[in-house]
Image: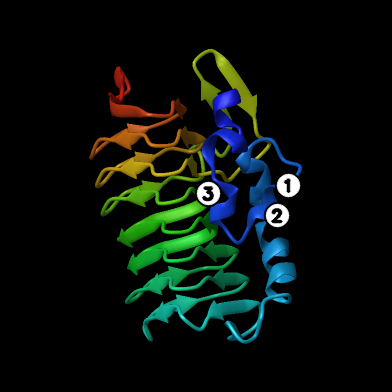
Amino acid sequence: MESCQISHLYTLSETIAADLFQGLTYPWEALPKIGAFICALGKTLDPQNYEQRGENIWIAKSAKVAPTAYINGPTIIDKEAEIRHCAFIRGNAIVGKGAVVGNSTELKNVVLFNKVQVPHYNYVGDSILGYKSHMGAGSITSNVKSDKTLVVVKDGAKEYATGLKKFGAMLGDEVEVGCNSVLNPGTVVGSHSNIYPLSMVRGVVKANAIYKNKNEIVEKK
């Protein structure tokens, strides 16, 4: 499961939440810790650069937040981020520098690294999206199995029991997810990989790959 390790998926210098991952091996181990981490980190943020707006909500003064957006805490919105019309941030959310959360996009228990874009009708729950990753319009993370059992990450014949009932997707740096794709619970996509539009993805997609369908995954050249 080496390809699923934090060190293989993410550039930790590209998130305000780098300390969240210290001492962890796999990124999903951070999911239960996001809320408490935000509450602790928020209290240390420089008030010259960040404004506290409500309970456990810190928003960088350089961020752009539409008046129609709904933001619940705990949440940190970092510098130069853009929260667009009717975005719905349910809490336990870190939105990185220069990230875009678009119209009717919903976030819940997530870390968006710097420059992430979830700009149109996306649902991102119990997930971590790496630097410059992008989800096309209508693509979502499905974070609960239909039978409500605990999520297992599957990489071919290898399996990793996460112990989590809610687990969406781990996207490495600079992943591109095509429009109207569904990332099923426990999906891990390696850095610099592309997911074709209208895909239904589960399990582990290696780095530098193009996912066309479950039977056709090719290496980028």
Task: Give the mark, 2 or 3, whose residue is nearer the N terminus.
Answer: 2
Indicate the amino acid at tag 1: Gln
Using the image, tell me which numbered label, if any, was put on residue 83.
none
Residue 151 visible, this angle: no
Indicate the amino acid at tag 3: Ile
The residue lying toward the viewer, choosing from 217 and 132, is 132
Residue 22 falls left or right of residue 120: right
Residue 181 falls left or right of residue 40: left
The quarter of the picture where the C terminus appears is top left
CB-based contact (under 8 Å), mark 1 and mark 2: yes
Q: Position of residue 211 (x, y in %)?
A: 31, 28
Indicate the amino acid at tag 2: Asp
User: Which structural element holds mark 1?
Assistant: loop
Task: Give the mark, 3 or 1, whose residue is nearer the N terminus.
Answer: 1
Q: Badge 2: how crowded within 10 Å, few (<14), some, or many (20+)?
A: few
> Given this view, does label 2 or label 3 mark the residue nearer the observer?
2
The residue lying toward the viewer, choosing from 168 and 133, is 133
Residue occupying image coordinates x 66% and y 77%: 56
Q: Which residue is mark 3?
A: 128
Q: Position of residue 95 (x, y in %)?
A: 50, 64
Q: Badge 1: how crowded within 10 Å, few (<14), some, or many (20+)?
A: few
Gap between marks 2 and 3 measured at Cα = 14 Å
Examine the rendered structure and indicate whether residue 67 appears above or below residue 20.
below
- How many numbered discs? 3
> Given this view, does label 3 or label 1 mark the residue nearer the observer?
1
User: Which structural element holds mark 3?
Assistant: strand
Using the image, tell me which numbered label, if any, was put on residue 19.
2
Examine the rendered structure and indicate whether residue 63 appears above or below residue 34.
below
Residue occupying image coordinates x 46% and y 81%: 62
Q: Which residue is mark 1?
A: 22
